[in-house]
Amino acid sequence: MNKKICLKDIAAKVGVSTALVSYVLNNKKEGRIKKSVAERIKEVAMELNYRTNQIAKSLKTNKTFTIGLIVADISNPFSSGLARIIEDEADKNNYTVIFGSSDEGVLRSDKLIDTFLNRQVDGLIIAPGENAAAQILSLQKQPIPFVLVDRYFPDINTNYVALDNYKASYSAMEHLISCGYKRIGMISFATSLFNIQERKRGYISALEKNGIAFNQDLLFEIRYDDMKAGVEGAVNDLMAPGRPVDALLFATNAIATHGLKHINTLHIKVPEELALISFDKTDVLDLFYAPLTYINQPLPEMGRLATKILIEAIEGNSAITQINLPAELVIRKSTSPHPPKGVHVPCDFR
Amino acid sequence: MNKKICLKDIAAKVGVSTALVSYVLNNKKEGRIKKSVAERIKEVAMELNYRTNQIAKSLKTNKTFTIGLIVADISNPFSSGLARIIEDEADKNNYTVIFGSSDEGVLRSDKLIDTFLNRQVDGLIIAPGENAAAQILSLQKQPIPFVLVDRYFPDINTNYVALDNYKASYSAMEHLISCGYKRIGMISFATSLFNIQERKRGYISALEKNGIAFNQDLLFEIRYDDMKAGVEGAVNDLMAPGRPVDALLFATNAIATHGLKHINTLHIKVPEELALISFDKTDVLDLFYAPLTYINQPLPEMGRLATKILIEAIEGNSAITQINLPAELVIRKSTSPHPPKGVHVPCDFR
DNA sequence: TAATTTTGTTTAATCGATTAAACAAAACGA
DNA sequence: TCGTTTTGTTTAATCGATTAAACAAAATTA
């Protein structure tokens, strides 16, 4: 239980002041310090196994080299995938990441922001939850930079990196329609979150632009905190006799996962009885017996850009950067062409 | 860009010393402070939107309320699942988690430990990689408590919470054998990691105890950094004509995920042509057309215990705690009974 | 040789808290 | 009434670094 070594210990052993030790160990005043002394200091530092106390350093320099990351749930593959990218990118710039899961709740994320600010993080990357607008507004008043990822608020002028969810959703629907599907349902969340709203808008807009009336009964908006039951109920309703649906769009990976499990147990034939498209790329979509067509979010790009923008902001760039990344539609078996009886419908496989 | 408020600002506004402010805000010297003054201080703190500088506090108190978490890869569902539990448990005790992914590499985890120690974390939770023994030994010399999770080194006396991997593997094999499978292969990693070695030992031991000779050709030990190709090659070999295998044990979820994808593309019939068991519980195993029998690790238990043990150690408990948790075998379709032609073999569905 | 510059190092303030010890005033006890 | 407690608050050291400014000695210049 050897006590911690500090600058003073090195200074004492070498017989110089702590200032000199600090200069040497930080490679400052290069030209000014006698070589022999510098070497001796480094030697002793090594020998005593010195370790800078980052806390003390941070206090003095007012910089912690720490980024606070707030996601909905670190155990969701979307969040953890993003976290990994951010970690790597932060590491390249010598930053460390502290994280927290908000569970989409305002209370939790308020607490997280509070904790992170107390800890003097240099900046924040936040995937904000539904009712976080007020929180974000108040964060703007703080002198700390932050970047929103995945979600943002169109009325608030902040840095963000997100997907162009409208376009993504729209093009997924166009694909389904071009493959001959007409009665297309969607399972989404009951939320005011802008990204989810945009997905809905894309869904409705694609229907209408293609002469298909939007039918409210085919759009299920379930609750986040009752996802499993919500998804199962929606699938049951959508597949119930009498109001058949021939294709279904899952608004998120979590919804898709629950949906696919249920579809499996119901022995629904995909794509013959039901075509499927999901947002997000997960292993689950590959493993379903009919690999799913999905809307691939450029996660690495998103994480990298968010971190880059944040670090630039930390370093003094005060410009606001807002990025809507394009999604990629990866077409697979779950949306094979479905020509209605006797009618030839060309399928668009661009 | 209002400058940060500190104790001094409150003290000045109220007209008292910073000491008094500190006492009030920390609820110390309760009886001694005049009520009116205390109230006024709290009021002004509120009004100025005061926020403790945790860095300064940590420097003085020598306590950061931070836990460093090192996993193999935060984007792996096992790691992120564990991270989530640890986050929640830490939060209950007012700790924050900083994390890093080692990618199973010594260099990376050395750097992570170094960074975390510099940051004066109060303790570490580590899922150590293959060659981390030396690192763990040197960590023992530091005055900082740590707990290993998932993996540990039998020769090093440290706190750990892990699975009883031998038993888990053994009972999975017993189940396969009792279901009538005889030529059982395994895909694992080429590693000296104790937990993986134990899984192998369980595999071999179960075979031999049941009168089946261990055949080295049926045990594939692939490289972590070339997982996809390794798994695909192994599956190809195991299913090649001439050396048929009728069941297969995946040593980890990542191996299973790659394996299942490949098995899907090869159109191998599970369980008729090949029974499957995997370690770890992931959504992927549910989504495979024949839901997989799997060895369920009690992740919540593991995370909670690890955090609990760590916090107790931080608080002064110097006893070493070593826990091997039992796994649970969840039996599903991928291991349905497989009686060899004409012979009745009872299947054990305990 | 005296003045100036350069070189090498130390002094001391500072970051923003905590907290033991000191202190002053009021209340109490004998 | 005078000593002793109690109450309420301040002083000042401290955590472990950083860094501007001061300083002394050596080297250079005039």
Image: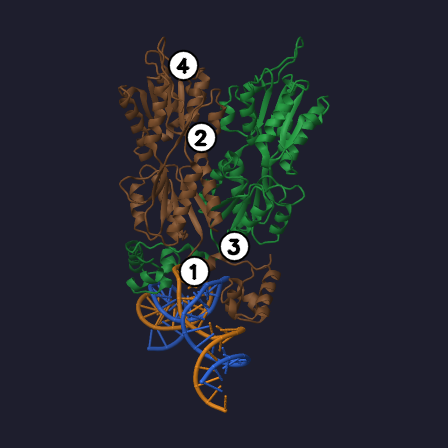
Chain colours: A brown, B green, C orange, D blue
Q: Which mark is residue B118?
A: 3
Query: What chain does mark 1 sit on?
Result: A
Q: Position of residue B51 (x, y in %)?
A: 35, 54
Tell me if I can see residue A119 in this picture.
Answer: yes
Using a 10 Å C-alpha cutoff, classify the residue at mark 4 as few (fewer than 14 neighbours), some (14 to 19) or many (20 or more): few
Image quadrant in which the N terminus of chain A is located: bottom right
Q: Nearer the viewer, residue A313 or B170?
A: A313
Using a 10 Å C-alpha cutoff, classify the residue at mark 1 as few (fewer than 14 neighbours), some (14 to 19) or many (20 or more): few
Compared across the picture, whether D27 is left or right of A237 comes to right
The residues tagged by marks 3 and 1 sit, at their Cα atoms, a distance apart of 15 Å
Q: Where does label 4 land, which residue?
A: A273
Q: Nearer the viewer, residue A111 or B273?
A: B273
Q: Residue at x 54, y 21 (%)?
A: B265
Earlier-in-chain disc, 1 versus 2:
1
Q: Residue at x 32, y 29 (%)?
A: A190
The amino acid at mark 3 is Asn
The residues tagged by marks 2 and 4 sit, at their Cα atoms, a distance apart of 23 Å
Q: Which mark is residue A224?
A: none
**In the image, is residue B263 above or below residue B13?**
above
**In the image, is residue A170 above or below residue B100?**
above
Q: Where does label 2 land, which residue?
A: A281
Q: Residue at x 48, y 25 (%)?
A: A286
Callouts 2 and 4 in the same chain:
yes
When asked about the image quadrant of residue A58, the answer is bottom left
Image quadrant in which the C terminus of chain A is located: top left
Earlier-in-chain disc, 2 versus 4:
4
The amino acid at mark 2 is Lys
> In terms of secondary structure, where does tag 2 sit?
loop
Q: Where does label 1 land, which residue?
A: A61
